[in-house]
Image: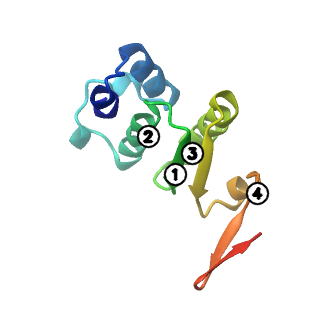
Amino acid sequence: MIPALIAGKFEKKRALSLLERVGLLERVHHYPHQLSGGEQQRVALARSLINQPALLLADEPTGNLDAENALQVQKLLCHLQKEQGLTLVVVTHDQKWAQSADKRYRLEETQLLSY
């Protein structure tokens, strides 16, 4: 995974673990054009987590996923939030997921309002 290589922290075991956690370990040798939009979105999520960031900004991280994979991604992000102290900022239209957040805001016209 390129971000980890650039940072000099590439660990194949961690990369494979993240791909497994997003349900794509069996697609490890596929090129991007061989993956569906939802699979590409899950690879992007794994890539964003490889360097164990303190903050993750996620704009519709489950937008292109079916219900099963969306739930898997939500569970992974919530687990990482607790496990690693990850600060997670999610933009979503999924009301159920939004309701589970510690803090919620909504964008109304040009104003950001507290829920």
Q: CA distance from mark 2 to mark 1?
A: 14 Å
Asked if the residue at tag 4 contacts the one at tag 3, i.e. Cβ–Cβ closer than 8 Å, the answer is: no
Query: Helix, strand, or loop for circle 4?
Result: helix
Closer to viewer: mark 1 or mark 4: 1
The answer to whether residue 62 of the structure is visible from this angle is no
Judging by the rendered image, the residue that carries numbered circle 4 is 99
User: Label 4 neighbourhood size at 10 Å, few (<14), some (14-19), many (20+)?
Assistant: few
Q: Whole-Å distance between the Cαs marked 2 and 4?
A: 22 Å
Task: Say whether disc 3 or disc 1 marks the residue closer to the N-terminus.
Answer: 1
Question: Do residues under tags 2 and 1 come within 8 Å of each other at their CB atoms?
Answer: no
Camera-side residue: 69 or 80?
A: 80
Mark toward the start of the polypeptide (2 vs 3): 2
Taking the view exactly as shown, the residue that stands out farthest to the top is 13
The residues tagged by marks 1 and 4 sit, at their Cα atoms, a distance apart of: 18 Å
Q: Is 51 above or below relative to 37?
A: above
Q: Residues within 10 Å of mark 3 (few under 14, many from 20)?
A: some
Question: 102 above or below 17?
Answer: below
Residue 38 percent location from the top left of the image: 41, 46
Name the element at disc 1: strand
Q: Quadrant of residue 92?
A: bottom right
Provide residue 53's location: percent of width, then percent of height: 50, 36
**Residue for badge 1:** 57
Count of number-bearing discs = 4
- The quadrant of the picture occupied by the N terminus is top left
- Which kind of residue does numbered mark 4 sit on? Gln
In the rendered structure, find residue 42 and report the number of the disc placed on it.
2
Kindly identify the residue that appears in the image at 43 percent across and 30 percent down. 50
Q: Amino acid at mark 3?
A: Ala
22 sits to left or right of 95:
left
Q: Residue at x 44, y 30 (%)?
A: 51
Q: Which residue is mark 3?
A: 70
**Amino acid type for the residue under numbered disc 1:** Leu
